[in-house]
Amino acid sequence: MDAIKVLHCADLHFDDEQGRLQNTIECCGRVIATAQVEIPDLIAIAGDVFERGLVLGSPGTLAAIDFVHRCGNVAPVVITSGTPTHDAANSTEVFNRLKTEHPVYATGLPRQVGLTKEEPREFKEVSGNMEGKPELYLFVSCLPSLTKAALAATGSRSIDGAGIEYAELLRDLFQAWGITNEKANGLGIPTILVGHGTVRAHDCRRDKGLPTRTPNLG
C-alpha cells in the first residue's frame, strides 16, 4: 500500500466581520501556498467552514467559495460539515457545484467515498460492497458533526425506539465502516477518516489512555 499525503484544515469560520474575515483569508492563503508546494493527494476540510452558515453573496461566503475553488485546482478536496450553529444544514452543499480541476466532495451526512484512479477522477459513494467499483486511489470515511437524527438516517435503525442511545448508533456506524475499510485495505487502498468533533473527559497532560465518556460530535 503506497503512502499518501493529506493536507488537513478545519474551523475556518468564514465570517462577514471585516477584521476576522481578513485574518481567515490570510490564513487560508498560507494553506493554498502550502498545497501548491506539497501537492497533496487529498485536501481535507473538516468542518466549521462558516461562522454563521451560508449567506449567498455575503463577503464571508464568497471568500469561502473562492478558497475551496482554489483548493480544488490543486488537489482533490473532501469537506465534512461542522456544528449546525456554524455550518447550517446543507450549507456546504454549494461546494459540490464548483467546477475545478480536481473533484470536490462535501457532505453533511456520514458517508464513505472512494477517489477513482482513472481520469476523469471523481469521488464515488460506497455503501459496504466494494465489488464492481472502479479502481480506487484512496477511500475516505466522512464524519460530519452529528445529531442523533442524522446518524440514524445512515442506517435502518430508528431513533423512535426506546433504548437506542447515541453511542450505540455511533458504534454501529464505525463497525460497518470498519468492515468496508478492511475490504479496501485488502485491495491495497489507503483509508482515511475525516471528521469534525471533540472528545470530552480526557486530560492530555496525563497518561489516562482512552476517554471514558461518549465522544461529543456536535
Image (cartoon, rainbow, N blue to C red):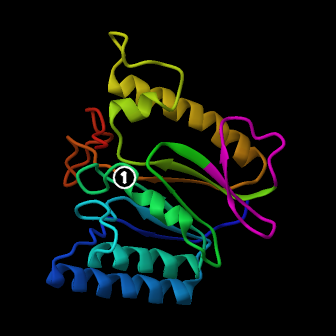
Q: Please state, as top left, top right, bottom left or bottom right, where the C terminus lies in the image.
A: top left
Can you give x and y, in whole percent of width and height, for residue 132 in the image? 84, 43
Can you give x and y, in whole percent of width and height, for residue 104 in the image? 57, 66
Closer to the camera, 195 or 84?
Answer: 84
The outermost residue toward the front is: 57
Quarter of the image for residue 201 reads top left
Can you give x and y, in whole percent of width and height, for residue 143 in the image? 45, 47
Can you give x and y, in whole percent of width and height, for residue 34 in the image? 47, 86
Q: Please state, as top left, top right, bottom left or bottom right, where the N terminus lies in the image.
A: bottom right
127 in the magenta segment: yes
Q: Residue at x 59, y 37 (%)?
A: 178
**177 relative to 6, above or below:** above
Q: Main secondary structure of the magenta part?
A: loop
Q: Residue at x 40, y 51 (%)?
A: 90
**120 relative to 39, above or below:** above
**108 relative to 13, above or below:** above
**Left or right: 82, with 180 as reference point:** left
**Left or right: 19, with 40 as reference point:** left
Mark 1 neighbour density, 10 Å: few (under 14) some (14–19) many (20 or more): many
Judging by the rendered image, the residue that carries numbered circle 1 is: 196
The magenta segment: 113-134
**Left or right: 189, with 197 as reference point:** right
